[in-house]
Image (spheres, helix red, strand yellow):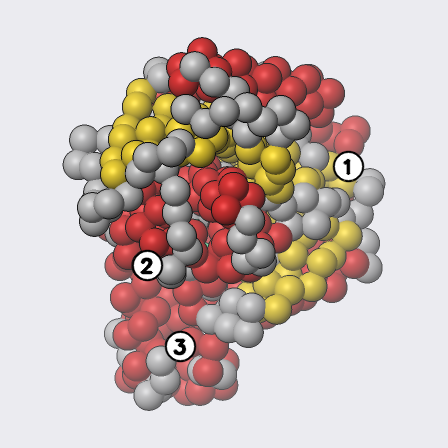
């Protein structure tokens, strides 16, 4: 069943109220600051971010929220409401290292570690975290957690670091502390998004262009309910194959390889490495064309570009799975040239993204209910997100004595 935007706004208000109440109940004093950071969906431009290429994500109105209050000592206490009120604690006086038993905690510890190394003066604090981004589905719940924690810490410490800087810190934390070799797309859009816009981000120059979404198209996300089991190892392998392809041309990045050069080198390249590079080069082109198509409200171009992107992820980059391909076929059968559909995110399961006229949303939901089951037997879950703005943080009104 899809949740409508008004239902989700109410749930969000309830979630944030719950966060402040849980904070007070657990730590015995009210929070003084809060921050919210959105998840994201990528419309097109997959695996291009770590190749210095182009991506076109937008923020969705699903969030991670953080509430905190300074302490007078150097202790950091974390309460994770979604993890069954699990807790983690560490001291700012010793080196912050990963917690081997709590994966969720390392997204928070990593941020403290990076900020400490960046010379941001941190103080002890109590922090509670809650979120409603479906986890493990490729909608960037972890990037939004990192960005929300950074935004909250910057608000507490009066830091004037920009949202772009928040994104860099979040990526450093993920790359060097959590150990995932992701690009910058997820944290960048969570930190900097503009409401009702997708961002065409040039990942080499870190410049972005905000593209208004055509009002007649609804953004639809379909959670395949296929767990993204291989994503870590396969992701890193794709990254290495792209680096190998760039090296073939004496370059450090595929951004500096032209299609003419790639095609003329095909006979001398490992066919798998050639195919990976072919995806990246064609995807960079499609992503820039998609930004034009969105701004021109050219739905036939949107449809074709998303279809080509999906085929390229399936055939050249080999990151789709049969269940995801099946969802794309079902939606395509309903929507045709009136909208677009493709897998979104790192691959090997997770979500499909579609843009379609509002009147076709119900028809697609019925087609999925009639024709799709995940290998586990689960039904797909459909989200109809609003396209939201990036992270925000604020000081809450009451201030009383420190704990
Ligand atoms: C994951 C990574 C991103 C990006 C996508 C694929 O979401 O975190 O940096 O590489 O996969 O486009």
Q: Residue at x 45, y 82 (%)?
A: 257
Give the secondary structure at mark 3: loop
Where is residue 109 shown, x and y percent of the image? 31, 42
Task: Indicate which label's residue lies in the foreground, 3 or 2.
Answer: 2
Q: Determine which quarter of the picture holds residue 108.
A: top left
Closer to the camera in the image, 27 or 43: 27
Q: Which residue is mark 1?
A: 357
Give the mark nearest the N terminus, 1 or 3. Answer: 3
Cα distance, mark 3 to mark 2? Answer: 28 Å
Q: Give residue 263's mark.
A: none
Q: Are marks 1 and 3 in contact (CB under 8 Å)?
A: no
Q: Which residue is mark 3?
A: 253
Q: Residue at x 40, y 77 (%)?
A: 253
Badge count: 3
Where is residue 281 shown, x and y percent of the image? 49, 72
Q: Is residue 225 left or right of residue 6?
A: left
In this view, the residue farthest toward the left is 100
Q: Determine which quarter of the picture holds residue 316.
A: bottom left
Give the secondary structure at mark 2: helix
Where is residue 89 shown, x and y percent of the image? 27, 31
- Tell whether circle 3 marks a residue whose Cβ is less than 8 angstroms from ligand 1: no
Task: Indicate which label's residue lies in the foreground, 2 or 1.
Answer: 2
Q: Which residue is mark 2?
A: 117
Give the mark nearest the N terminus, 2 or 1. Answer: 2
């Amino acid at each position: 069943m899809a949740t409508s935007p008004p239902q989700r706004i109410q749930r969000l208000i309830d979630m944030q109220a719950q966060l402040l109440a849980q904070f007070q109940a657990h730590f015995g004093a009210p929070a003084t600051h809060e921050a919210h950071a959105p998840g994201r969906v990528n419309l097109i431009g997959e695996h291009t971010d770590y190749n210095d290429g182009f991506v076109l994500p937008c923020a969705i109105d699903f969030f991670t929220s953080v509430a905190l209050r300074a302490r007078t000592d150097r202790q950091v206490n974390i309460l994770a409401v979604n993890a069954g009120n699990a807790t983690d604690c560490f001291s700012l006086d010793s080196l912050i290292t990963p917690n081997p038993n709590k994966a969720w905690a390392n997204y928070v510890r990593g941020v403290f570690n990076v900020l400490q190394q960046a010379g941001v003066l941190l103080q002890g604090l109590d922090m509670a975290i809650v979120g409603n981004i479906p986890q493990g589905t490729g909608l960037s719940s972890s990037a939004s957690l990192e960005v929300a924690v950074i935004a909250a810490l910057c608000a507490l410490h009066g830091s004037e670091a920009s949202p772009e800087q928040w994104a860099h810190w979040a990526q450093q934390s993920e790359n060097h502390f959590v150990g995932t070799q992701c690009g910058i797309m997820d944290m960048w859009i969570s930190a900097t998004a503009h409401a009702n816009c997708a961002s065409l981000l040039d990942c080499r120059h870190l410049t972005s262009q905000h593209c208004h979404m055509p009002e007649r198209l609804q953004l639809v996300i379909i959670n395949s309910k296929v767990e993204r089991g291989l994503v870590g190892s396969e992701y890193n392998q794709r990254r290495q194959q792209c680096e190998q392809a760039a090296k073939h041309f004496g370059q450090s990045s595929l951004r500096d390889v032209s299609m003419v050069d790639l095609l003329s080198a095909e006979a001398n390249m490992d066919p798998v490495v050639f195919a990976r590079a072919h995806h990246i080069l064609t995807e960079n082109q499609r992503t820039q064309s998609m930004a034009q198509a969105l701004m021109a409200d050219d739905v036939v171009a949107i449809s074709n570009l998303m279809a080509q992107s999906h085929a390229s992820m399936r055939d050249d980059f080999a990151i789709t799975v049969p269940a995801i391909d099946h969802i794309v076929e079902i939606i395509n059968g309903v929507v045709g040239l009136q909208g677009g559909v493709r897998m979104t995110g790192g691959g090997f399961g997770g979500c499909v993204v579609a843009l379609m006229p509002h009147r076709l949303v119900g028809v697609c939901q019925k087609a999925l209910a009639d024709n799709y089951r995940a290998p586990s037997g689960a039904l797909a879950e459909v989200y109809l997100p609003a396209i939201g703005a990036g992270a925000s943080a604020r000081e809450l009104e009451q201030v009383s004595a420190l704990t």
